[in-house]
Image: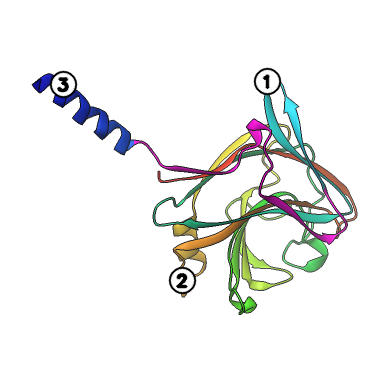
Amino acid sequence: MKAFITFFLSLGLTFSAMAEQIIVGDFSNKNLQGWEEKSFVGNSLYKLKKEGEKWILSASSSNTASALFYEREINLSKTPYLNWSWKIQNKLNPRDETVKAGDDYAARIYVVRDGGLFIWNTIAINYVWSNQQKQFATWNNAFVGDNAKMLSLRDNESKTNQWYQEKRNILEDFKKLYPDEDVTEIDGVALMIDTDNLKTKAQSYFGNIFFSSK
């Protein structure tokens, strides 16, 4: 009996130690439910595609700028880590990304805290595949200023046609990039490919996207 109780106690400890996950991009199961497109300039093409034995999300742009947005409240105190994988097929020509004429990216993922009726209180972090900034550089978005902070997670030194696995502590990133804000929840995640300012083409791919407790 004692051994029986010990077994179930250890089992409970094992389950409690497992990381909590919230899947928002379930692309490997051919699932785009909940994702809605928002167009800025035309429509980029987003579609599920099979690569080898797994399904991924393909994103392509030809002088276009549109995003896929997934609206869901995420408690960053419980699941602060955003996890995803991505790769790009081609790099964009280097251009100053701090100005509107250069604000294009072969791939980006951003997290948003909605300001509600006070739209000027909406803030976001953009994790981008930069073509001009060095890795881990940060700057204000060229169109909305400090309401969207840009962070170069991959740069022109990163290889094309190679998958990169990413993991960011969103709670900590908000503290660093918005020290005057107390962000413990976000309201959505978006992914995007855009080439409308550079008037060119790009192709990228995304794997599953999920939040985790560790």
Residue 113 placement, left or right of 91: left
**Of the two numbered discs 3 and 1 in the rendering, the one whose residue sits closer to the viewer:** 3
Residue located farthest toward the left when viewing the structure as drawn? 2
- Residue sitting at x 15%, y 26%: 5
* Mark 1 in CB contact with mark 2 (< 8 angstroms): no
Residue 200 placement, left or right of 68: right
* Amino acid type, residue under disc 3 in the picture: Phe
For the C terminus, which image quadrant? top left
**Of the two numbered discs 3 and 2 in the rendering, the one whose residue sits closer to the viewer:** 3
Instruction: Report whether residue 30 is seen.
Output: yes
Q: Which residue is mark 3?
A: 4
Residue 175 belongs to the span the image colors magenta: no
Q: Nearer the viewer, residue 15 or 164?
A: 15
Q: Percent position (x, y) of residue 142?
A: 73, 69
Mark positioned earlier in the residue sequence (3 or 2): 3
Mark 1 to mark 2: distance in Å? 43 Å
- In the image, which disc is placed on residue 26? none
Mark positioned earlier in the residue sequence (1 or 2): 1
Element class at badge 3: helix
- Residue sitting at x 69%, y 29%: 55
Q: Which residue is mark 1?
A: 53
76 relative to 19, above or below: below
Magenta segment: 18-44
Q: Nearer the viewer, residue 66 or 151?
A: 66
Q: Percent position (x, y) of residue 66?
A: 79, 55
Residue 32 belongs to the span the image colors magenta: yes
Q: Which residue is mark 2?
A: 179
